[in-house]
């Protein structure tokens, strides 16, 4: 994956504060991405700064991330950074909420990184409950949820329906366990961000959904905070274009997860709170690989049966398909890529293959040698069903066990 850097122009950065005591490293960096927000920026940042100064118990920074505004937003951001202690301004030459968060979070030295919409639709009283579980080490990410039973939300019917449909779609297609993917109120621990951000490709509105999906698949703990939220009537988000971009993002991430392009197993071993990945998704992928392997095995058996005999054909067909099956399950089902531990995986996969060979050979031994091919195939299919179940258990709990494969 190509990582693009977004430079901060030197002459346009905010003026340095007057000399004084060295500022403390912030525990929390609140990033506010903006694009053409000259009308509301000063009021929102001033209100946010007053709230944090009066009610927030941790050292903080507010980072205004201006992503290619063409109005007076950047000048206002510079003035705010010069006037308010703990406020910084960052300018990017390209648009995109995800791009702004990538740039601001990647350069931050804070322990917890926050994202908040400039309209401050979310009640600021939820900020402390959002970051506290991350500062304590209890959770890895935290999100505000407008769909929690105790949340109080004021917004139009159209946005309500779109939001609920989007989150239902995420649950149905990507097995997402979090309730609200796109609420503009999220936080992440800096160490987790450093690991996940290089894997997130979307520069726009799908950025935080992609981040949450990767985190959840990696076994990270996502804390949800019910929020009070009031819709911004001046929102300029193109709902249709955003929805289409989200659908494309979902398709891309689903494909990446299915092909093993994202190192989920390594992430789970490093950060996963639950060392046992979700069995449902693994079973589905294992079943698909198994079905294709069985078709290939039966085709090879029938092809070789006449020349090698039943036992020889069984041995050769199993050997060929076992190698392909182990490779496919290693990559698709259990998320391992590259050469790391590959030799051990294939060696142990061959041991599992030997078990399958013993079961299928035993099934053939119980069938008279003069039996029709259909009878032999029936016995072999029955033996393969049992072998498949045993293979899944052994691959999951032994060969590709996260505990055994933790570096």
Image (cartoon, grey):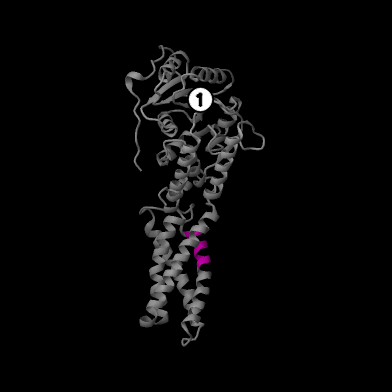
Question: At x 52% / y 50%, what residue is drawn?
Answer: 173
Compared to 158, does 219 lie above or below?
Answer: below
Residue 351 position in % (x across, y down): 44, 67
Residue 83 position in % (x across, y down): 46, 13
Residue 400 position in % (x across, y down): 46, 56
Q: Nearer the viewer, residue 102 or 60?
A: 102
The majority secondary structure of the magenta stretch comes to helix
Seen as rendered, the residue at the extreme right is 150
Which range of residues does the magenta coloring cover?
A: 388-398
Q: How many numbered marks are there? A: 1
> From the viewer's perspective, is 68 left or right of 269?
left
Residue 407 visible (yes or no): no
> From the viewer's perspective, is 99 left or right of 49?
left
Q: Is-magenta flag for residue 391?
A: yes
Q: Nearer the viewer, residue 249 or 309?
A: 249
* Mark 1, secondary structure of its residue: loop
- Please identify the quadrant where the N terminus is shown: top left
Compared to 293, does 198 lie above or below?
Answer: above
- Within 10 Å of disc 1 (Cα), the crowding (few <14, some 14-19, many 20+) is many
Quarter occupied by residue 339: bottom left
Quarter occupied by residue 134: top right
Residue 220 visible (yes or no): yes
The residue to which callout 1 is attached is 118
Residue 123 position in % (x across, y down): 60, 26
Q: Is-magenta flag for residue 29?
A: no
Question: At x 50% / y 20%, what residue is drawn?
Answer: 40
């Amino acid at each position: 994956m190509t990582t693009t850097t977004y430079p901060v122009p030197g002459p346009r950065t905010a003026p340095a504060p007057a000399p004084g005591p060295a500022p403390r490293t912030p525990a929390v960096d609140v990033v506010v991405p903006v694009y053409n927000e000259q009308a509301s920026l000063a009021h929102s940042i001033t209100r946010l700064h007053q709230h944090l100064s009066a009610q927030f118990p941790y050292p903080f920074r507010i980072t205004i991330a201006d992503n290619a505004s063409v109005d007076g937003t950047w000048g206002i951001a510079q003035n705010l950074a010069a006037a308010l202690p703990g406020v910084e301004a960052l300018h990017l030459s390209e648009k995109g909420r995800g791009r702004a968060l990538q740039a601001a979070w990647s350069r931050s030295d804070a322990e917890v990184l926050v994202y908040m919409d400039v309209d401050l639709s979310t009640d600021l009283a939820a900020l402390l409950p959002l970051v506290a579980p991350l500062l304590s080490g209890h959770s890895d990410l935290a999100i505000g949820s407008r769909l929690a039973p105790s949340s109080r939300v004021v917004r139009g019917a159209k946005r309500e329906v779109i939001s609920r449909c989007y989150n239902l779609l995420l649950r149905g297609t990507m097995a997402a366990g979090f309730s609200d993917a796109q609420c503009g109120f999220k936080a992440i621990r800096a160490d987790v961000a450093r690991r996940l951000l290089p894997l997130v490709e979307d520069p726009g509105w799908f950025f935080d959904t992609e981040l949450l999906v990767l985190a959840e698949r990696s076994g990270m703990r996502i804390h949800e905070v019910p929020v009070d939220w009031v819709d911004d009537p001046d929102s300029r988000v193109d709902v249709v274009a955003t929805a289409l971009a989200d659908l494309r993002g979902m398709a891309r991430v689903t494909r990446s997860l299915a092909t093993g392009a994202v190192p989920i197993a390594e992430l789970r071993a490093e950060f996963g709170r639950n060392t046992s990945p979700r069995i449902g998704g693994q079973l589905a992928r294992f079943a698909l690989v198994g079905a294709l392997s069985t078709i290939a095995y039966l085709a090879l058996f029938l092809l070789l049966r006449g020349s090698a005999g039943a036992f020889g054909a069984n041995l050769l067909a199993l050997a060929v398909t076992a190698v392909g099956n182990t490779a496919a399950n290693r990559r698709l089902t259990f998320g391992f890529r590259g050469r790391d531990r590959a030799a051990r995986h294939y060696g142990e996969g061959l041991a599992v293959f030997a078990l399958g060979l013993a079961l299928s050979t035993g099934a053939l031994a119980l069938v008279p040698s003069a039996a029709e091919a259909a009878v032999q195939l029936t016995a072999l299919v029955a033996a393969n069903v049992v072998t498949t179940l045993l293979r899944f258990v052994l691959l999951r709990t032994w060969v590709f066990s996260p505990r055994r494969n933790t570096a």
